[in-house]
Amino acid sequence: MSESTSAQDQETIQEYIAKRISALETENKNLADELETTKVEREEVRAKLFESLITNKKYMREVERLKKENAILRRMPLFLATVVEMGEDYVLLRQHGNNQEFITTAPPELMPKLEPNTRVAINNSLTIVRILDRCVDARAKAMELIEAPEVSYADIGGLEKQIQEVRETVELPLTQPEIFQGVGIEPPRGVLLYGLPGTGKTLLAKAVAHESMATFIHMSGSELVHKFIGEGAQLVRDIFQMARDKTPAIIFIDEIDAVGSIRTHDGTTGSAEVNRTMMQLLAEMDGFRTRGDIKIIAATNRIDILDPALLRPGRFDRIIEIPLPSLEGRMKILNIHAGKVNMAPDVDLDKIAKETEEASGADLKSIVVEAGMNAIRRGATTVSGDDFKMAINKVLGDEEEKKATEGCARMFS
Ligand SMILES: Nc1ncnc2c1ncn2[C@@H]1O[C@H](COP(=O)(O)OP(=O)(O)OP(=O)(O)O)[C@@H](O)[C@H]1O
Ligand SMILES: [Mg+2]
């Protein structure tokens, strides 16, 4: 009985082992198959990687080539242009110099930085290469910009009537434009100051800017035509643009006679240039009437040679003469400049004022400074009457000589 049982058991065990072996064999085969598939897949990935490496190398070479090309393009002379308008994928530019307008594109990294009036450098194929900083632009050097000059009416001696007139025409429309709207008249847009050198024209213009809390933009007519040859008209446009950006603003055009003298038609490039600058100035002056917050103050020593177009009613609302100071004016000017000077008791400013007829405000200032220098030379700490006497001789004596030489120069010219 026990023998047959153990034979049966043995059979069952063998059967079990046989089944197990067969199961393991199947599993083994499956795993071998899987391994094979993975191997194939790995080969495929390897092939793809290899392909990518080749493509990558090709792209790298292309990048290098483009970089070099870009560097060459940047080295080529670039031109200046200003953005006029822009959309999602285009930029409308105006080229300086020839004023041509054209539509172009910019590299994607520059696009968000562009806005109307941005200055850019463009290459031969009119593509924007870089953005120019406004501040470093050489054109900006043609004008001096002072946010609020430090000069007040109290620094001006005499000229009460002239200050009053300038206040009415320039300061009032800037500080209280509603008065003009109320009455229903157009606010004045500017004044022309004329008078001998050193009489305080620039000083007065700065004081008005200070008192009206306006930006003071100083441009010099002679620099415009002599230093920035060929760019005068563009500069005038830029200066008015600058004023529009910085309102309220006062544009002070010093030596307006350099651009605004009677137009010559001798056909030379110089006169054509001056005429173009002048035409631009007239156009800008006519164009901004609607804006109350920009005012023009122009100054000249030579009103006699100014173009009648500038003097025509409607261009400057007032033409104001800035005369040499009267006796009373000279006293005030001397007091202003000698205010902080340590003076010996023998100095009589009233007497000095009487002795300095024909002296301008600038001369009187020079006299005070010169007298101070004389005291320093003597090693003294107070300025004496004699120091002043020598200073008057030096400053006004020179003046006489200067006038004589100027007269001669005019005779021979
Ligand atoms: N009326 C004045 N009161 C006080 N200082 C004056 C006066 N006039 C002139 N000055 C002094 O003389 C300096 C030169 O004057 P300013 O530059 O205003 O003359 P200007 O009339 O503009 O001369 P130019 O025609 O040569 O440009 C002033 O900075 C100021 O110190
Ligand atoms: Mg001046």
Image: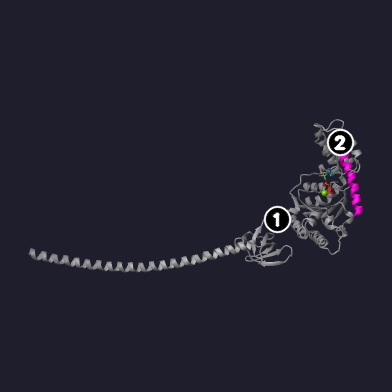
Residue 320 rendering spot, x and y as whole percentages? 87, 51
- Is residue 54 shown to the viewer in this render? yes
The local secondary structure at tag 2 comes to helix
Q: Which residue occupies 31% across, 69% down?
A: 33
Q: Which residue occupies 14% across, 65% down?
A: 10
The image quarter containing residue 365 is top right
Residue type at mark 2 is Phe
Q: Which residue occupies 85% across, 32% down?
A: 384
- Is residue 329 shown to the viewer in this render? no
Q: Which residue is mark 2?
A: 388
Quarter that holds the N terminus: bottom left
Residue 403 is one of the magenta-drawn residues? yes
Kindly give the residue lying farthest to the front in the view shown.
412
Q: Which residue is mark 1?
A: 137
The local secondary structure at tag 1 comes to loop
Kindly give the residue lying farthest to the left in the view shown.
1
Residue 69 rendering spot, x and y as whole percentages? 60, 64
Residue 315 to residue 382: above or below? below
Tell me which secondary structure the magenta stretch mostly adopts: helix
